[in-house]
Amino acid sequence: MSTPSDEFVMRLALDQAHNAWLVGEVPVGAVIVRPGPEGPQVIATGYNRPITTHDPTAHAEIVALRHAATLVENYRLPDCELFVTLEPCAMCAMALMHARFKRVVFGAPDPKTGAAGSVVDLFAQGQLNHHTAVQGGVLADECGQLLRSFFAERRAQQRAERDAARAPQAQAQAEAEPDHAAAGAPDVPDDPIPAGDATELPHEVLAVLPPR
């Protein structure tokens, strides 16, 4: 069960996800908070940047994690919580546990690479030396809809680009085809005999054929 505080922070993560969309990245956003005298204090944010930075590790969680560790000047963040709009992958899950995060909260599940229960559950591995509390499904509908809208737009753009690329080729091919009627070519019958079908000739025609 999510709390109003959890939903508030997740909406901040959704804002970060929109930033990713604006620069052409898959819209995933993350926010890191730690306890403060007046409630959770935001210490770092991040959004997906692998395409724009040419860095396959630049997921939203890793970007936010690097900012937070630099800010507090420590690679361990045991009192911090991370909110992310999409279930962390295996890379991000292990990074968060290495940093000793207290809690991870995600929005939409990821049925392809989710490492918090959808594909594997690394956070539940008892053999590991640190165990981070996990909660999923906070504003899951909003987080999932953002991703679905992004990929729908991406597919529409790809179709438009393909159609635009094919148009000149189709026009050139049409212009290159000869006009059979103008060239005096024989008309093609509407219902030509299918290939492989035999046509029986009348007997009088057969009679005048020379012997082989």
Image (cartoon, rainbow, N blue to C red):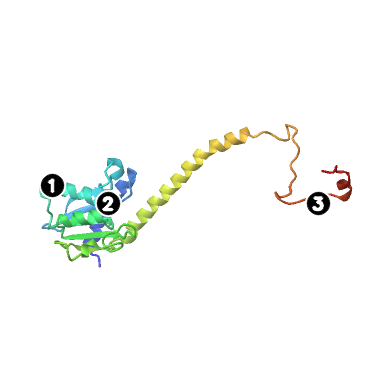
Earlier residue among tags 3 and 2 = 2
Residue 36 located left or right of residue 192: left
The quadrant in which the C terminus is found is: top right
Residue beneath label 1, please? 71
> Residue at horizontal 21%, vertical 65%?
124
State whether residue 5 is above or below residue 47: below
- Please say whether residue 45 is visible from this viewpoint: no
Q: Which residue is mark 2?
A: 29
Side of 167 where 60 appears, left or right: left
Circle 1 Cα neighbour tier, 10 Å, few/some/many (<14 / 14–19 / ≥20): few
Q: Amino acid at mark 3?
A: Glu
What amino acid type is highlighted by mark number 2? Gly
Q: Residue at x 28, y 58 (%)?
A: 87
Count all numbered tags in the image, as a single digit. Answer: 3
Residue 169 found in image quarter: top right
Dot 1 or dot 3: first in sequence order is: 1
